[in-house]
Every structure is written in C-alpha cells, then in structure tokens.
Image (cartoon, rainbow, N blue to C red):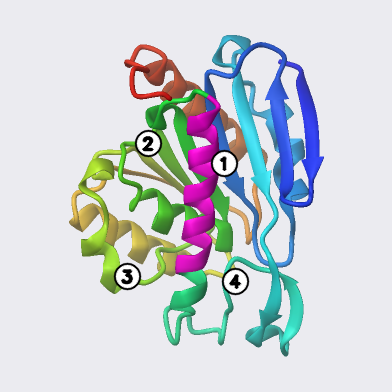
Amino acid sequence: MKYRPQESEDGIVLTPDSPAGASVIWLHGLGADGYDFVPIVSELGLPAEAAVRFVFPHAPVRSVTINNGMRMRAWYDITGVDIGAREDAAGVRESAVTVERLIEREREAGLAANHIIIAGFSQGGAIALYAGLRHAEALAGVLALSTYLPLRSELAQAAAANRSTPILMCHGRFDPIIPYAVGEGSRDLLRAHGYAVDWRGYDMQHEVCRAEIAAIGAWLAERYGAASVRSSSSAK
C-alpha cells in the first residue's frame, strides 16, 4: 500500500491511495512527536484492501515535572517515578478531548466509529486506553504499547459502548520506565471489569521489537477484516 503523507502543525497523516475504509489514530510517547511511529506503517504488512489511514498527532509542548520542568511534547505532566501517584488528571482529560476531536474528524471524513482504532505508546498508550474506553460509540479496537491505565479509580465511568472492544496490550519484560508488573496490573484491572484484553509480553525494554510489530500488524488486519463486514450506516 502506498501512502500520501500530509504534514501540519498538528501532526502527520498517511492517506492510502485508495479511499480510506478505516483509520488508526496513533499517539506517541513522552518527548517524541508524531513522526516517531510513521516508519512502522510499512512494516505492519497490512493488506492493500484494508486501505487504512494513519493519523499521528503531535502532543502539545508543556513543562514536565519529572524532567526538571523541561518543556517537551507530552500528553500530560508526570510528577514522579511512582506511576499512579499524583497523576495529572487535568492533563489526561485534556488529551482525551484531543482524541475525541480526532475521532470526530475521521467520522466527518466518512468513517464509522467501529472502523477507527486508537493506539499509543507509553504516555500515548495511557491516553489511548483512557480516551478509547470513554468514547460514546464502539470503536474497532484500542492498541496500548508499553503503558498503563491512568486514573484507575475512574474506570467505572467508562462508556458501556466499548466494554467489548478488543484491546491489545504489549509490554517489555525488562521495561525500566513502566515496569512489566505495572502493565500487568492494568491488564488485570481491565479484565476484572470485563474488558477483552489480549496481552503480549516481549523480551525487550521500553521500546518496540520486530515480533511485536508483526503481532500488531496481524491484530490490525484481523480488526479491519471484521470491521469490513460490519455496517457503516453510522458514518456521517
């Protein structure tokens, strides 16, 4: 599949040559930008008929407490190494609103909600989980890489529409940034609330590896193979 890259101040969009029938909104990690995961698209091995549009937004630039207040692209502030303590709830919710706007843009482009996947790595994965589970319509899936569920106490407030939405969580067993056990804890909490979490562990640190990319490609192809037979009547 060939893509036409479109760049703006908000991020990068890879549009397939044929009319897009699905999309992935992919959020980068702390200190990176929308370009970070662009190279992975060509490695996913997606079938051309899937015609997936990839949206890679830039996080806003903000001061990050754990990095001595340095300003960098971040979806929310991080105050310390103890994940889950003193969370930047306002920042998480603000970024979730950004994701909602991106979903609405895809809907306005003619895609049904169940043809849209929210993906993210690290901080971006945390926002993908938080925002994806709160969207009012059923999505095609949520992809959460090397990450955790933020604002855990608010999970009960998630929308019922995405209770059965497929979730793929991948994590490095030797991750020094977000420990494997933290990812497992989020997985267990989601499963305890009835979410369908497909968990994959890899012998890596806070990164992605080839085996993981292959698994992501297969999972996306499966999601969009299923989505292609669903009704798109809800598309605007």
- Near mark 1 (Cα within 10 A), the count class, few <14, some 14-19 or many ≥20, is many
Find residue 192 and report its image quarter: bottom left
200 and 97: which one is in front?
A: 97
Amino acid at pointer 2 = Leu
Q: Residue at horizontal 39%, vertical 20%?
A: 227
The amino acid on which the numbered mark 4 sits, given as a three-letter code, is: Ile
In the image: residue 83, left or right of residue 213: left
Q: CA distance from mark 3 to mark 2?
A: 21 Å
Q: Name the front one of labels 4 and 1.
A: 1
Of the numbered discs 3 and 2, the one sitting upstream in the chain is: 2
Q: CA distance from mark 4 to mark 1?
A: 23 Å
Q: Mark 1 belongs to which amino acid?
A: Ile
Q: Are marks 1 and 2 in contact (CB under 8 Å)?
A: no
Q: Is residue 121 magenta?
A: no
Image quarter for residue 206?
bottom right
Indicate the secondary structure of the residue bearing disc 2: loop
Earlier in the chain: of badge 4 and badge 1, it is: 1
Residue type at numbered disc 3: Arg
Range of residues picked out in magenta: 93-109
Q: Secondary structure at mark 4?
A: loop
Give the residue pinned by disc 1: 25
Query: Residue drawn at (80%, 40%), measured in percent from left and top?
Result: 7
Mark 4, residue position: 177
Residue at 63% across, 60% down? 205
Rendered position, 45 above or below 102: above
- Crowding at dot 4, Cα within 10 Å, few <14 / some 14-19 / many 20+, comes out as few
- Judging by the rendered image, the residue that carries numbered circle 2 is 139
Crowding near the residue tagged with mark 3, few <14, some 14–19, many ≥20 C-alpha atoms within 10 Å: few
